[in-house]
Amino acid sequence: LVENEGVESLVNAWSSGGGDPWLYPLYNASTEQQRRAWWARNPFDRDPEMVAEARRKRAERAVAKAKLREERREARKRERALKEAAKVVVDYRPVMSRIIDDYLFRCPTWHYAHLLNL
């Protein structure tokens, strides 16, 4: 005959839907996300080629994310540099006054007006 403990565990397994939750944590998972997380951590049931492919894809995703983070970092750095450059105030008055004076000096009307004021 079967021992009492064996009968109790059999009845408990049957009444809970079958399976020992310690042996099959997949059935103990309450959400799809937990189930997927368990399979991601314990891929021993799968084909070794599938496991290698999954690991390769995971590594590729990590590299792609790192590249994207680096691009975003560079973009933020560029934006900060442009903001700092926008804060710099350039005084164009000396240059513009020189250009205007040069233009007026060459203008015959200005010469005539200047002669009248003397």
Image (cartoon, rainbow, N blue to C red):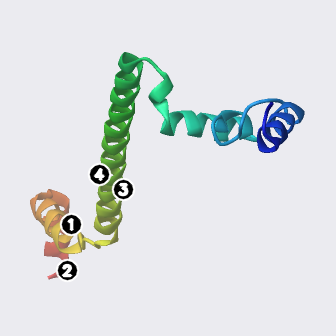
- Reading the image, the residue beneath label 3 is 76
Residue type at tag 2:
Asn
Choose mark 2 or mark 3, whichever is in front.
3
Label ID, residue 74: 4
* Residue located at (33% from left, 27% from top): 56
Disc 2, SS: helix
Q: Earlier in the sequence, mark 2 or mark 3?
A: 3
* Quadrant in the rendering for residue 4: top right
For marks 4 and 2, the one nearer the N-term is: 4
Q: Residue furthest bottom?
A: 118
- Residue placed at 34% from the left, 50% from the top? 75
Amino acid type of disc 4?
Glu
Q: Earlier in the sequence, mark 1 or mark 3?
A: 3
Camera-nearest residue between 29 and 13:
13
| Mark 1 lies on residue | 96
Which residue does the numbered mark 2 point to in the structure image? 117
Contact between marks 3 and 4 (CB within 8 A): the answer is yes
Q: CA distance from mark 3 to mark 4?
A: 5 Å
Mark 4, residues whose alpha carbon is within 10 Å: few (<14), some, or many (≥20)? few
**Residue type, mark 1 in image:** Met
Disc 4 + disc 2, Cβ < 8 Å? no
Mark 4 lies on a secondary structure that is helix
